[in-house]
Amino acid sequence: MYNWDFSAIFTGYEAWWLKGVLTTLAYATGTVVGGLIIGVICGMGLLAKRWWLTLPIHIYVEVFRCTPVLVQIVWFYFALPILTGIDMPAWLAAGVGLTLYMGCFATEIFRGGIQSIDKGQWQASRAVGMTYPQMMWHIILPQAIRRMTPPLVNQSVIQFKNTALLYVVAVPDMMYTGYLVVSDTYRPLEVYTGVAIAYFILLYPLTQWGKKLEARRGN
Amino acid sequence: METDASNGQAKLELTNVRKNYGEIAAVCGVSMEVNSGEVVAIIGPSGCGKSTLLRCINHLETPTAGKVRLGNQEINYDNPRTIPHGRELALFRSRFGMVFQQFDLFQNKTVLENVMVGQVVVQKKPVDMARKVARDYLDLVGLSGMDDRHAQDLSGGQQQRVAIARALALLPEVLLFDEVTSALDPELVGEVLEVMQKLAKEGATMVLVTHEMAFARDVANKVIFMDAGLIEQQGSPKDILIAPENKRLKSFLARFHGNSAG
């Protein structure tokens, strides 16, 4: 039977772990918010139905949706500087990759949410004399956002977990911190179990909140 | 574009209005006049272009050609560069009140809010005044005390009456009714027609696309029979509905005999 000793991986490493948790939280929040902003802008762009606007957005969405986020992070870090001379530090390359990845899914969720609103709502808004922005703000978006919330929460949970990929470019998130602690303590079982539990503790409330939102939508 | 100052006295004029969807012509050049206080019923077989024509009047569909004039304000579709858009178009549209077959109440709003939102957002009325006006019109359609309900809690007939109140609250100069009783259960049709009859009596200008022949006969000043995108015949309810001479009109009406046309 293995002799578990969690104190060995904590004592003396508190500051490392704290930094790891904060880094993970910062990347999760930052890339989700950034992705949502991209989603709103690109989603709106798709609705405009101008080919010179929708074509680049479609290309962006499909490229990022159909390549692994791990490949994207590595590509931004190693390939982009060689191709363009833009030398991004690791923390930025990883952030850009993760944000664009979230953004492409948010774009699709946003577009789908708006297009799912019944045609009658659009024509009734126009018939009372609303301009396009008024219609969007007062009638379409409030309904669309309720529909978009569950898939967006779901995607945010996935995004949160994807931040673990930061370790490949040595950004000190929870996962990379775990890697450092392992090489210091030779206790991979405690470290990776602890890391898994930490992700769970951080994410479980988020999924429960998502469920609550979904239940409220049903009334 | 200039706006008619004499509110509520404006005459609606359509000149040679056409609407094509690609190669298919839905409305093939319709001219008609609706004077202030008149009730005009448009009848015809399904697919004859009557709903499309109605939607061309307030630019829910953009006509391919022709002119639509309300009072002093005219949109000339023959000269596409002069077609208004944005705020100007929205204001033109708000001079019409429209009621739809499927009610289309705003799902994210209560009954009261449905009747208020156009006043507040489009007409910039203070909320207190809008609320008072909304209550007055809900009262008119017989729906007092339902302020906080949502559309899904109402029957079809009630929803349609809220939709009528929503249109009326904006003090439109012309009311457009697009088969407003077609989606209702038969026992709920009466309550909606009753409200419309009351409006007609009070002198509202109304254009209605309808299959309710008895209602058209009793309430309309003029009946227009459309077929294949054109006005086939128009005249008094008596000429069109009671003693029709046109062959296609006769065969169309024959399908309603023994039903509501009586």
Image: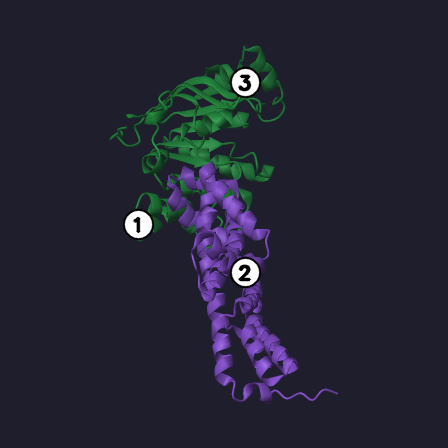
Chain colours: A purple, B green
How would you rate the neighbour count of disc 3 (Cα within 10 Å): few for under 14, some for 14-19, many for 20 or more? some
Whether A89 is drawn above or below A49: the answer is below
The image position of residue A48, as x and y in percent, is: 45, 40
Q: Give the residue type at disc 3.
A: Ala
- For marks 3 and 2, give the CA distance: 63 Å
The image position of residue A6, as x and y in percent, is: 61, 87
How would you rate the neighbour count of disc 2 (Cα within 10 Å): few for under 14, some for 14-19, many for 20 or more? some
Q: Are marks 1 and 3 in contact (CB under 8 Å)?
A: no
Task: Identify the residue under disc 3.
Answer: B228
Q: Give the residue type at disc 1.
A: Met
Residue at 38% of width from left, 29% of height from top?
B205
Q: Nearer the viewer, residue B194 or B137?
A: B137
> Would residue B142 be visible to someone looking at this image?
no
The image position of residue B181, as x and y in percent, is: 54, 35
> Would residue B12 be visible to someone looking at this image?
yes
Picture disc at residue B129: 1
Number of labels in the image equals 3
Quarter in which the C terminus of chain B is drawn: top right
Quarter in which the N terminus of chain B is drawn: top left
Q: Are marks 3 and 2 in contact (CB under 8 Å)?
A: no
The image position of residue B26, as x and y in percent, is: 52, 22
Q: Which chain letter matches label 3?
A: B
Q: Nearer the viewer, residue A171 or A57?
A: A171
Q: Nearer the viewer, residue A152 or A45?
A: A45
Residue B249, picture quadrant:
top right
Task: Identify the residue under disc 2.
Answer: A74
Residue at 60% of width from left, 51% of height from top?
A66
- For marks 1 and 3, give the CA distance: 46 Å
Whether A58 is drawn above or below B173: the answer is below
Is label 2 in a helix, a strand or a loop? helix
Closest to the camera, between mark 1 and mark 2, is: 2
